[in-house]
Image (cartoon, rainbow, N blue to C red):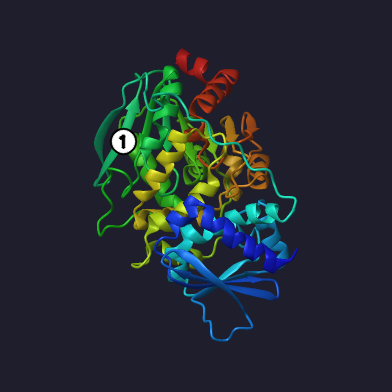
Amino acid sequence: MDLGALIESLLKVCEQDEEFLRRSSFVEGNVRLGIGSTGFVLRFSRGHIIGISGDDDPSVAWDYEIVGPETDWARIWKGEMDLTQAVQPKFASIMVRGNRVKYAADIGAVVQLTRLMCIAAAELGVDVKPTAPPPPRGKPNPWETRHEVLGRYVDVDGVRTYYESMGDKGPVTFLAMHPAGRDCRQWQQFGDVVAEAGQFVAVDLPGHGKSWPLMGGRCLTTMDEIASFTWAFHNAAGIGGPTIVLGCSMGGDLVFQLAAEHPNEVVALVSFQGADYTAGEPEAARVLMDHPMVNPAYHHMPRLISLIGHRTPLPQREYLQWETRCYSSVSIKADLTAFANFDFRSRMSEIHCPALLIRGKEDWAVNAEMVNETAGRLINARAVEVVMPEGVGHFSHLEQPEEHGALVLDFLRQHSIIDKAKKK
C-alpha cells in the first residue's frame, strides 16, 4: 500500500463527507497519524484539513498522535474495525499519545476520519469489507406500546428511585436492568412484548434517568453494591413470587449475580451482551469519562455508533444517540468501573435456573468467546442456551425488541417457566 497516496485520497474523501465536515467544524490544530515507521501530520483549520506534512518537516508540531503498526492500520482501512475499537488493547496496538484531552474533544471527527479510510482505500483498488446496508426506517410509530407505561417512585435505602412497569401482575415478574450509563426507557418496547406473560418492571439505578443519586452526588461503583441495591428495590417495590431477571451489558453481567444470590426467587435469567467476566480494562481508560474539560456525550458517541448493529431501525439508532447526549459523567464512569472489575467466574456453579444468553454478532465490546465461556461455566443451570443473531450490536433488546421479546418468551415456554409459575 502506498501510504502517501492513501492519505491524499483520504483528504479528498473527507472534504466530500457531510458527516465528517459536521463533526470537524470546531477542530483546530495538528494531528499526527503514525502508521508503522511512517508519519503524517494532518493540519486542521476552521474544521477543514488544510494540508498534510510528513515527519521530515520539523516546522510542524502536532497536538497529539495516533500511532500503531501498519498491520493494525490496515484493518482500519479495510473496514474491519474503526478507531474506537482499535485503541482497545485487546483488539489492536494503536495508541493515542500527547494531548489526550484535545483528542477527546476531537474524537467524533477523528473516528469518522478513520471510518472514511476504507472509502479512500477502495478508490485506490484495495479490497475492503463491503459496506453494511443502510438501516431500515422502522415502523411509522416505533415508540407506541400496547401496554400502558407507568412510572413510579419508591424509596430504596433512602434513595428516591424511579421505575417503570407494564402489564398486570401475573404468575411471574420480569425485572430488567439497564446498560452502563443508561436508564429504564431502553426497555419499553421489549417490555411491551413480554408483558403478556407477567408484569414487566425496569428500574433506574441511583443517579440514572429519573432516580436520585446517592448522598454527595455519587453512584454505585461495584457490582456487589449494584446487586444489593437492585434486590433492595425488588423488595421495596413489592415484587414477590417468581422473578425473571434481565439485563444488558452491565445489567447483563448483573443477572448472573442476582440469580446466584437469590435462587428461591429467580426462576430464569436472560443476559443480553453480558458475561461472568468482563474485568481487565485499566482504570486509566476511564480517567477522561469524568474530566471537567471533556463532554462525556461526545466522548462516547463514536463508541456508541460502532456498537450498533446494521439491522437497527433508524428511530432506535437515533434514540441511542440522543440518549448518549443525556449521559451523566458520574454515572457512566461508575457503571463502567463496576463492569471493568466484574469477575463472577468462581460462583457460576451456584446458578441453577435456566439461562438464556443473547449476544449480537456485531458487538465487539462483549465478544463470542466471553459469552461461550460464560455458558460453559453454568454447569448446574437447568438449561443453557446461547443465541447470536446476525446484524445486531451491543443493545440487542432495544435494536430488535420484537424479535428478542419473542425469543425470550419461547425460551421460557420451552422450559416451562411461565407454565410452572401459573400453577403456583
The quadrant in which residue 93 appears is bottom right
Q: What's the amino acid at mark 1?
A: Tyr
Q: Residues within 10 Å of mark 1 (few under 14, many from 20)?
A: many
In the foreground, 88 or 184: 88
Q: For the C terminus, which image quadrant?
A: top left
Give the residue displayed 62% in from the left and 29% down from the top.
382
Q: Position of residue 47 (x, y in %)?
A: 43, 63
125 left or right, relative to 360: right
Q: Position of residue 252 (x, y in %)?
A: 51, 41
Give the residue displayed 64% in from the left and 83% down from the top.
56
Q: Position of residue 328 (x, y in %)?
A: 34, 54
Q: How many marks?
A: 1
In the foreground, 260 or 254: 254
Give the residue displayed 37% in from the left and 34% down from the top.
202
355 left or right, relative to 314: right
In the rendered view, tell whether residue 61 sits above or below residue 249: below
Q: For the view shown, which residue lies furthest in the bottom direction? A: 58
The quadrant in which residue 332 appears is bottom left
Q: Which residue is under mark 1?
A: 163
Give the residue displayed 36% in from the left and 24% down from the top.
144
Q: Is residue 280 visible?
A: no
Q: For the N terminus, which image quadrant?
A: bottom right
**SS label for mark 1:** strand
